Structure formats: structure tokens, C-alpha cells
Image (tube, coloured by chain):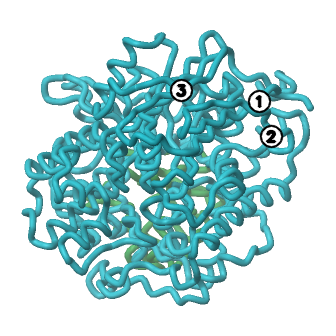
Chain colours: A cyan, B green
Amino acid sequence: MSGPSGDKLIYVDMTDQSVSVKDFPDEWKLLGGRALSAKILLAECDPSCDPLGPDNVLVMAPGVLSGTAAPTSGRISIGGKSPLTGGIKEANTGGQPGQHLMKLNVRGIVVKGQPADANARFALEVTADDAKIVAADDHKGKWNYALCMDLHEQYPKTSSFITCGPAGEMRLTGASVATTDQDNRYPARHAARGGLGAVMGSKGLKYVMVDPGKSGVRQPADRKPFGELCKTYTKDYLDGPQMFKTGTSSVVPVANMLHTFPYKNRVEGQSPDAQTLDGARIVESFETRGGEMHNCMTGCIVKCSNVVHDAQGEYKTSALEFETLTLLGANCAVASWEDVADMDRLCDEVGLDTIETGAAIAILMDAGQLEWGDAAAMKKLIAEIPEGTDRGKAIGNGAVATGKFTGHHRVPTGKGQAIPAWDPRPLKATGVSYCTSPMGADHTAGLIVNPGLQPDQFAWESQKVQIVNAVCDSSGFCQFLQPNLDNIRGFYGALYGEEVTREQIHDQGWQCLEDEWEFNRQAGFTAADDRLADCLMQDAIGAEGMKQVFDVPAEIIQAVYKRMPAQDDLFEAKASG
Amino acid sequence: MPKVIIPPPYRGPTQGTGEVEVEGTTVLECLEAVDHKYPGFLAQILDGDGAVHRYVKLFQNGDVLDAGAALRTVLEPRDELEVLAAIAGG
């Protein structure tokens, strides 16, 4: 075999805090990130297990290209059985740990078991020489930023971190896993969806420290063609429109126009506050307050992350994304992006998914237990979550838990997970993805922003984007780089010095989905679960005279599960999430 | 006739149609011709003052058009006018 060699998997048993290192199977060399996580979980995790019990398995897996010179390729997948959906879950994030682990030839960390003492905290330290569990009781309960400030003092400057905030320690099912970014090493990047922070917390694992030391980038089979590919791809990207150079938050006006900028717990698809929540306001603030667009990981050419400063010019948060502005902003009738920035920082501190948290608070408001648009009360509420109040725990456990807490009927979810900003009523093909994706209602698994699609196109468009995104999320590439399957197989081929065919890359994406669907079948999911909440099928949104509900017939939804023949558009479709 | 290429987010009014050949000699005339065939299309591209929305980018044969002068740009019969929109979650 040519290309990177000496790869390994780190196995951690939290029951006795032991660590072992295994060789990474050669036949898995093109498995990374999401696909690797799915392969390990299907083989080594009982799908019927309690997601917060000792039998769940937490996987941390960088992409195949992470640690190489390929642009924007350092994403890391966090996987496990989701305590929110009850099915398999993968959430990926940027920052530095993915790059650092791969520079150490670590293709994945597999965490099993659970300490006998639920109050004990541990950390995993990974360096070029060793991987070991150490006590971390001193860091128990720390908010993410304070934790990372202390860790920066404790460890070499070359290190990066994967951390669990207090919400994860409390096993709240809306909890995220944080990673540190490259500039200031803040814990501002989050594998947010599905409550995987609670799985990390249930294992008593407060953080993972990765120090690559002086390890260099991973070397391809043949440096020249790989280098040429990196150079050409980068040039083409930078010569192109660079649609994300002002961040995802700049999508607000388009989403509002398309009636997919939900307002007041999704009873409307447009917000009267789109102007003040538009990410353009954030970019405008750079001139007077400082802040900038930056790259969250080394080697990123997209630079979609906005660094947001407050009125005094001090760092507030990064990145303030479209989804956060929608769920914690418009959906709760909050009009100010600055208020949303405060809440984004709070969620990053506590370790919470901003989508799930925003959706949960909107349900609380819709139930009459909080005033619409009361940002001050929202901030207080998020800050009280670590205190363990009943209301705080309901919000921290997400939309369904808050629906039960309030007794409210309107709970916009799919498979137990809050619907993201992209609404399945105007975007019905995206709704088909929410119904069929092994990830549940997760836009990163299969976003299709095409309101003109006809029903007979929904199944193929959904299957296509689910395959493309599964491959992208296994490669380490960021979806915002928008690679297609031909791009990804080109990089794989140059990395290992052997051609990867269209058929192989199609197979890989499909197999990832099959592994995940099989896990969910064994967890008890059936076709009856492939539906969205009643409110999305009953409450119409859209322009006057053109209001829509989600009404895609079951036979179209179920058609996604049957592999369709590949056409050229499969290989040319860009990742989209 | 110039061809107008419409990105997926703006295909609601066109009922999924992604390419339209239209009569027109300027960018504005071509966009108006699309709107004539598919009412509601132009409102997605232009703001209330008739200027191109900040978040819309127009390309002539692959070259980005300056936002201020884009609508007056002359198109040749074999030109392609592509509309682009940034769409992502995050």
C-alpha cells in the first residue's frame, strides 16, 4: 500500500480507564469520519442499548483527508447512539482536533464503558508518544471557555481540545461536543446535533487533549499529483463566487424570501425581523467593533466563520451561524443579532445545540410560559440550565422534553429531534430527507433548497444528496467547500496512488447509509417512524394563497430506501448542508 | 437567444425549470422575459428599488457582473446569464 501508513485506532474503556491501541485495518483506508463511525457502531455497539449507559459507544473520527494538505479537510465526526433520537448519530465539526489526530495517524478514538463513580471526571491525553486517561475532577462542571483557558495553561501551545460542557456532564440530551478552533483556541466549534455531548458526559469524559507536537502533514502516495490537485482545486474555488465568504448568516434574506426563516415556533415562515437578524449586520459591525471572517481550522480556504465582537470591541462568539440566528432569533421572535450572539456564546459555554435549544425555548414561549422576544429572559434561562432547575433541564433536553414539560401541542420535530431552520413545508424534498435520513431531522444530512421540485423528483434528489453528504462527511471536507463526488474520489486517488472509480465512491456513500439504517432498524425503527410532527402536516406556511403543509405521500418517502441507478448528476452534485 | 440559468432556490416560480432561453438584449430585459413566462421570478432577484438584491450574484459566461452595472449589461444571443445564490445551514 502506498500513501499514509501506520494508522491506528485508540480504544478507551472508561469502566477501568484503560487505553489500548489497535492497527487501523488496511481495507478501511477510505473509511473516515461518518462512514467509519457507522462501521464501528454497527459492529461494536448494541443498537438497543441505553444511549446514556455503559454499552453505548462514542466514536471520534477525523475524515480520510484530515491532516493532509487538502484544503478545508480537517473536520472530525462524533458518533454514537443518540439519546435524543434513539438512533445512530453523527455530528461533525471543524476546529483543530481532527487535523491534529490525523497528524498522529489516529484514525479514530472509540470510547466504551462507564466509570462506576458517576461523579468522577477523566480526560484522555493523546500525544505522539502515548494515549492515556488521567483524572480531571478539578475541571468538573466548568463551562467550556473557562475550561479551555485552564487547559491552555496546563498543556503545550500546540495542543487542541475536544470538550464536554456542563450540559453534557448533566447528560442533557441537547448537549453538544465542543472543539477548539485554530486562532484563539476557543471552544467555539460544536458537533451539536443529537445530544452526543450527553454521551461524552455519561462516560465521565470531560475532555480530550491532542498534542501533535512537531508532527507534519500526512504525506500522500505521490506528492506531486496530490499537490497539484490541492493547488488547482484551491485556485478554482478562490476564482469562483465564494458564496460563503461572509458566512452562513448572510443566507437570512434568501431564507426569509423562501418562507424558511421560521417565526414564533414555526407558525410563520417569514420573520418581520429579517433585516436586523441578517448576517450582513454582523459583517458591517467589523468596521467599528473589530471582528472578522476567519478559518476555524488550518488549511481552510472557505473562511465562513465570523468572529463577533461586542460593542466594546471585545470578542463575543464565533461563528454566529444562520441556524442559530433562526432558531434562537426569529423562531423566538428575537429581533437583535446581538442578543442572539449573547445566546450563542452561552450555548457554547454550557455545551448545547443552538438549534435544539432555540426550538425548545420557542415551545416554552408558544405555551405561554415566556414572553415572545424576551431575550433577557432567554439568556437567564440558558444560564440556569447548569443549575439543574426543572425548567432548565427541560430546555436542555430539547424540544420533545419541553413539549412534555409544558404540555404544549406544537412540537416541530422529526424522530425526536428539532427541525432545523430549513422548513420541510416549502422545501418538501428536504422534508423527505428529514423523514428518511438515519440522522433524523438534520439539514446537514440532506438539504435540498429547491422549492420548484416536483413530487416525482423528491426521492432521487433526497437519496442523491444523502449519498453526497455521507461521503463528504466521511472525507473531512467541510460541506461549505461544496465538493462533489468526483472531487472527493480524485483526492482519495491521489492520496493513496490508486484510482477510485465512480462506482466505488457511490458504493461508499450508499454503504454508509445502509450501515446507519441497519443500526436504526436494530434499534427498533420502522417505516412508521419516517414522519414529521403533526404540526408540520397541519399548520400551513407560505405566501398568501400558496400556503403549504408537509404532505409528501409515504410511498415517495419510502422510495429513498431503494438504491437508484447513478446518473451523472450524482457525481456532479455539490455537498450541501 | 441568451440562456438564463436559474439556481435551485429560485426555481419555485419556474416549477423546477433551471434553464430558460429568452428574447432580450440586456440582462434586465432577459430577467424580465423570464418573469413574463414565470411570474414571481423577478421579485426574487430585484429589490423594491429595482436593484439587484445584495445576496444575488449574476454571471455572464462565467464572469461575475458588477452589481451596479449588471442590469444594463448587453448580452449576445449565445451568452449565458447565470444567477447564483448562497445557500447553506451551519
**Callout 2: chain:** A
Residues marked 2 and 1 touching at CB (< 8 Å): yes
Q: Quadrant of residue A504?
A: bottom right
The residue that appears at 28% across and 25% down in the rendered structure is A146
Q: Nearer the viewer, mark 2 or mark 3?
A: 3
The amino acid type of the residue labelled 1 equals Asp
The circle on residue A253 is none
**Alpha carbon of mark 3 to alpha carbon of mark 1: how far?**
20 Å
Q: CA distance from mark 2 to mark 3?
A: 27 Å
User: Horizontal and vertical percent for residue A61?
Assistant: 62, 40
| Residue A239 versus residue B49 in the image, above or below | above
Indicate the secondary structure of the residue bearing disc 2: loop
Give the residue at x 56% y 57%: B81
Residue at 17%, 43% (x, y): give it.
A383
Q: Residues within 10 Å of mark 1 (few under 14, many from 20)?
A: some
Q: Is residue B28 visible?
A: yes
Q: Amino acid at mark 3?
A: Ile
Q: Which residue is mark 2?
A: A29
Q: Amino acid at mark 2?
A: Lys
Of residues A267 and B59, the one nearer the viewer is A267
Image mark for residue A7: 1
Residue identifier under label 3? A133
